């Protein structure tokens, strides 16, 4: 049996209050059946067929959900609910991890580091990706699936992919040597406008972030919560404070041992990050 986890994010920009990574775990066979049903719901003609689902477009009634095409809040909600019901029929487990951008900036991004090239401290994406992997590992252990390999599919992310690939081998090794080993498989990045299970993850992540912001859950989100068992892992300020303290101690040790300066997040670090992202984009273009 081949297990596949599909994961997407919402709230990527620091000016948004929360950052969420969320997704679903299921078998390759169930994902194939899911894709057929998801496409059939997208193709419903009233008010128009959809080329793909994107939560930001659905929420703003733009793009595929443009109100110029006849979409309204009520019609959008009906289509989202139908899509959520498809996901609830085929996903075996759900999982989500989240963090407040404000807490992240206060306790983690503020820590001076020897270098900030890998974005791990500047943005919560990589850490939360590790938290999502841990959530899947816990689910695998609890449900007796730890003997099955799990492949992970993330939505394509400019700038973050190299950092996540760089640390993935270490995470996979840690899971393989845990008291109850978990087989972590391949790491892949795909376009969520083309990979239908990633569209479901996008809806889940976006709906969760909206619920964090408004304390209101859409019917689609409630359907996912009730129809799929799983777990949530919002990171608390105390956890981030401990993480920041540990990072500072490690950074000071490296600085002392190798006589390298510690760099605070700011204009210089931001320029380093932009340069790193440009290099990542150039590398991705060469691979194409």
Image (spheres, grey):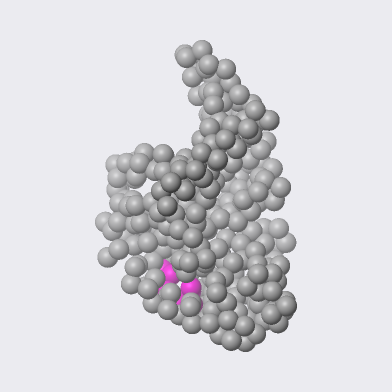
Quadrant of the snapshot with the N terminus: bottom left
Magenta includes 88? yes
User: Magenta segment, principal secondary structure?
Assistant: helix
Q: Position of residue 179 (x, y in %)?
A: 30, 44
- Residue at horizontal 61%, vertical 62%? 206
Quarter holding residue 65: bottom right
Q: Is residue 31 above or below residue 164?
A: below
As rendered, which of 247 and 157 lies closer to the eye?
Answer: 157
- Residue at horizontal 55%, vertical 41%? 277
Left or right? Give the position of 235 relative to 179.
right
- Residue at horizontal 46%, vertical 63%? 24
Left or right? Give the position of 285 relative to 50.
left
Q: Position of residue 126 (x, y in %)?
A: 51, 43
Magenta extent: 86-92
Q: How many marks?
A: 0
Left or right? Give the position of 102 relative to 194.
right
The answer, for residue 54, to whether it is visible in the render is: yes
As rendered, which of 216 and 6 lies closer to the eye?
Answer: 6
Q: Position of residue 99 (x, y in %)?
A: 61, 48
- Residue at horizontal 71%, vertical 58%? 213
Q: Position of residue 50 (x, y in %)?
A: 57, 77
Q: Is residue 191 above or below residue 47?
A: above
Q: Is residue 55 above or below residue 270?
A: below
The answer, for residue 82, to whether it is visible in the render is: no
Magenta includes 163? no
């Amino acid at each position: 049996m081949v297990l596949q986890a599909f994961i997407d994010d919402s709230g990527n920009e620091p000016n948004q209050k929360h950052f969420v990574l969320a997704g679903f775990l299921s078998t390759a066979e169930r994902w194939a059946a899911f894709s057929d049903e998801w496409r059939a719901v997208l193709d419903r003609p009233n008010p128009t067929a959809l080329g793909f689902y994107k939560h930001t477009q659905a929420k703003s009634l733009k793009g595929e959900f443009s109100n110029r095409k006849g979409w309204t809040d009520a019609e959008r909600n009906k289509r989202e609910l139908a899509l959520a019901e498809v996901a609830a029929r085929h996903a075996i487990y759900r999982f989500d991890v989240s963090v407040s951008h404000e807490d992240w900036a206060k306790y983690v991004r503020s820590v001076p580091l020897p270098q900030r090239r890998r974005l791990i401290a500047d943005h919560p994406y990589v850490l939360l990706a590790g938290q999502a992997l841990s959530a899947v590992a816990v689910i695998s252990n609890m449900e007796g699936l730890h003997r099955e390999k799990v492949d992970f599919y993330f939505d394509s992310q400019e700038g973050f992919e190299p950092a996540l690939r760089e640390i993935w081998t270490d995470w996979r090794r840690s899971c393989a040597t845990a008291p109850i080993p978990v087989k972590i498989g391949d790491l892949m990045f795909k376009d969520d406008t083309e990979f239908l299970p990633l569209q479901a993850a996008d809806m889940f992540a976006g709906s969760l972030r909206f619920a964090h912001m408004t304390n209101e859950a859409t019917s689609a989100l409630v359907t996912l919560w009730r129809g799929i068992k799983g777990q949530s892992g919002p990171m608390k300020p105390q956890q981030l404070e401990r993480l920041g303290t540990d990072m500072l101690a490690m950074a000071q040790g490296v600085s002392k041992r190798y006589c390298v300066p510690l760099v605070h997040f700011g204009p210089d670090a931001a320029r380093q990050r932009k340069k790193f992202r440009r290099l990542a984009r150039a590398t991705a273009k060469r691979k194409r």
